[in-house]
Amino acid sequence: MKREVSRDVERVVLTLDVNGEKRDVLVPSHKTLLEVLREDMQLTGTKHGCELGECGTCTVLVDGKPHLSCLALPIQLEGRAITTIEGMAHGSELHPLQVAFAELGAAQCGYCTPGILLSARALLEENPRPSRDEIREALAGNLCRCTGYIKILEAVELAAGRIQ
Amino acid sequence: MRVVGKPLPKVDAAAKVTGRAMYADDMLLPRTLHCKILRSPHPHARILAIDTSAARRIPGVQAVITGIDLPIKFGILPVTQDERALEHEKVRYVGDPIAAVAATDEEIAAAACDAIEVEYEVLEPVMSIEAALAEPNDERIQDYGGPNNVHKLVALEFGDVDEGFARADKIREDVFFFQGNTHLPMEQHSAIATYVGGRVTLWSSTQVVHYVHRALSKVLELPMHRIRVIGAAHGGGFGGKTDPFAHEIIVCKLAMLTGRPVKCTLTREEVFYAHRGRHPVLMWVRTGATKDGRITAMHFRSALDGGAYGSYGVASTFYTGALQPVTYDIPAYRFEGCRVFTNKPPCGPKRGHGTPQPRFAIELHLEKLAADLGLDGADLKRSNFVKPNTRTVNWLRVTSCGLEECTERVMDASGYRTRARRPGHGMGFAISSYLSGAGTAIYWNDMPHSEVQIKVDRGGVTVYCGAMDIGQGSDSVLATIVAEELGLQPSDIRLVTADTDTTPIDLGSYSSRVTFMAGNAALEAARKMRAMLVEAAGDRIDQITFEEASILAEAKFGTLTSAGSYTPPKIAGPYKGSGVGPSPAYSYSACVVDLDADARTGLVHVNKIWIAHDVGRAINPLLVEGQVEGSVYMGLGEALMEEQVFRKGLHKWPSMLEYKSPTFLDMPDVQTFIVETNDPEGPYGAKEAGQGPLLPVPPAVCLALHDALGVWIDEIPVTPEKVVEALRRKDKGEPPRYGPPHFPDIPYPPVIKVQPPPRDS
């Protein structure tokens, strides 16, 4: 299979609202949000596991809802509020989910952690007291190979209890 | 104990929950070039010609290399140096690397790979164990080993097996198959290299910086002191990043040629082809027992589908036979092992390395033997448990052993003995053991397996160690041990780890060795430092702060440094091949699985898993639980869904969607019991936690399924199709079983007879 590469690819100037900061970027129009965040904005906290929309690792929030950044095009996201893991803490103060994940050992290698934290945050904002099955359902699109998911479930429950 | 045994957060937890941990692909160095690798589309072919001229003409391409540029072979084991970073003579699996491009961006590099013309002479691929045992139609995959495509044959006998069978009241034979599967780390392998002032620096997602360091030195023909390997934050390994990889060598070479940083991150598809995962293993086992269920002899045969290269395969082969006598007291034992080459991605070590397959076979086989004798399977197993402070028939030294206590804990909590019968519901019980570090290094040398240095100045403590934290928490273990000895908190300790320029040697994160080996080295170094501080502080030790004590000690002794190291005891038996299996201590696990199975659809729903793990001593119980739960999860995935299958040389499902692994919705509740037996040689009594608890899960699932539906699935994974087929056979009055029909004829060599150690030693 041959790829067509033209060096005069269409480039666009976009104003993206990421973690409450508006920034202008000049990027090829086909570049994914994942690539723009990591390569053009140096927001490398967003990870990638497949770049095909299968593993949930690259999850970010768009207007508070989980989105797979590897399948999202920034050109469609101007004016939308994008939240990455870098925007989860308030200054040096960690979000209760981050605190609970650290306390309970819910991050082992930590690679899936940013995506799972953001999915969990979206869940708690919509449903502050989720049952364990509701947490499972909400996080089912995020794979983790280290934890067996158990400490993650416990950490989400701990954080939910503290946010009350 | 002030901090040992406390459920403290990992020392790197804050970096990981904020996205600040720096993984290899997160590194952005000025002027970085991007590398793509052209890989073989054929499972088996000779390379007749490679034309890179069109690729070189593409604007943005800075360098193109082929096998001519990296001709020296490497491999993790000294006896199987059979890989090249780029092949220019022959390719042996789909995905074998042929050429590499460095370009100003990834898309240009990919286009340049497409522009490389390769002329192949396609050869017939060898895709199964049976085909590898037969005479090849074209040519052999490798030019060593044999006969045909056999890579390695071993045959050992400990004690008089024929005599053991002669005095048995019942002898049983079974055949099992464990399909291959892969690690599926969330992080795709990534490496970035620079070349400045005649020195190469490589940051990589590796489990073993020292072994990568050695391979780079060999292939790049640079002395080791001109190469620096740094383990970047690690996004999951499970054994899959324990070999030196082609892309690691390639980025170094391209950095040397271009004078610019070069990065290569594998695509997910490439990760599936990089593999080095669980070997598919066919197994045949024959065991004799007295009528009260005591094992009199065991004969075990394995045939491993190794894929195209050696990797860890010789060790994997021995591991399929080594640990059987470490769980059960087997007075006479014969092991015949065989590994073959096939035209598939090379297999290697995955969590449990070569032992989950025989563990599965033995646990089912003994249950069947018990049924033949009219005994309860769990009772038969318990009556044969190894005892603490014994030597096995194959000379392995067992020290602490918590098998009995582990069994009690899961039996009691699960209600296994008193379970009520209802249709489609079942429970299964299985046990396991695993090494706390391999007793011998990958290559022969007399150096310690781990070394730790500690520096104290201005009240701060820095620990230096080559150990690589792959998420299991090895940095936290080092910090906890040093903090315990120095009266501090783990969060007070600064760590410099996995950097070949600045840290002393540690062999890396494999074989569950880090807590035991690096932990003991850290303990020695910390105690020496503590002694200096105590001596300098004198009578005032209880009145002054750590900072004040460190100033007094620095004034008295000058620069404050201490060092510790760990070398495993020389306990290998007196025979060739005895280097695989010895460990300074073995962990033990017991597991009960509770499930419901649908006889109509074959679907299995696991309700709950109870697991007890003898970790010796939990240095951090939170991290031990995390390792145990993660192991149970991975074992369950292998038991029910994960499999690496090929069709016409191609991986059938090289994507995370199609390669099924358990999600949040598939994972049952797990109740974990930590059992502490205080190993006499472990740091504070600690043993391993990261691998052993995987092992009992697949057999416990199969045993529970048999309990539920009365069918034997003698093959992993247990898919609904296999369950339904076994039920169909049962309904037809055939043996209620799905599994391999027979074990192939293998030209094992004559057995080497080894006198076992005296029974009372």
Image (cartoon, rainbow, N blue to C red):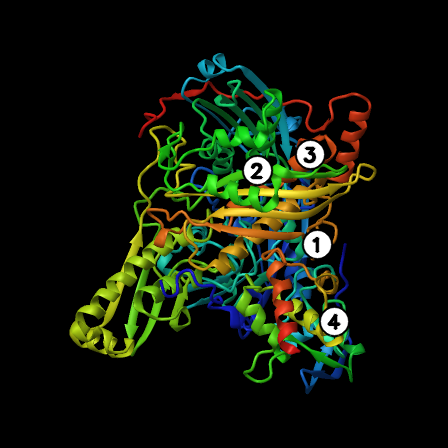
- Element on which disc 2 rests: strand
**Residue at mark 2: chain:** B
Q: Nearer the viewer, residue B159 or B105?
A: B159
Are the residues tagged 2 and 4 within 8 Å (C-beta)? no
The reply, left or right, for residue B311 in relation to residue A44 is: left
The reply, left or right, for residue B552 in relation to residue B149 is: left
Q: Where is mark 4, residue-wise?
A: A66
Above or below — where is B311 with respect to B368? below
Which of the 4 quarters of the picture holds residue B568? top left
Quote the CA–CA distance across marks 2 and 1.
30 Å
As shown in the figure, which amino acid type bears the numbered disc 2? Ala
As shown in the figure, which amino acid type bears the numbered disc 4? Pro
- Element on which disc 3 rests: helix
Q: Where is mark 1, residue-wise?
A: B656
Crowd band around label 1 with a 10 angstrom C-alpha radius: few (<14), some (14–19), many (20+): many
Q: Where is mark 3, residue-wise?
A: B707
Quote the CA–CA distance across marks 2 and 4.
41 Å
Query: Looking at the rendered structure, which numbered label has been put on residue B430?
Result: 2
**Residue at mark 1: chain:** B
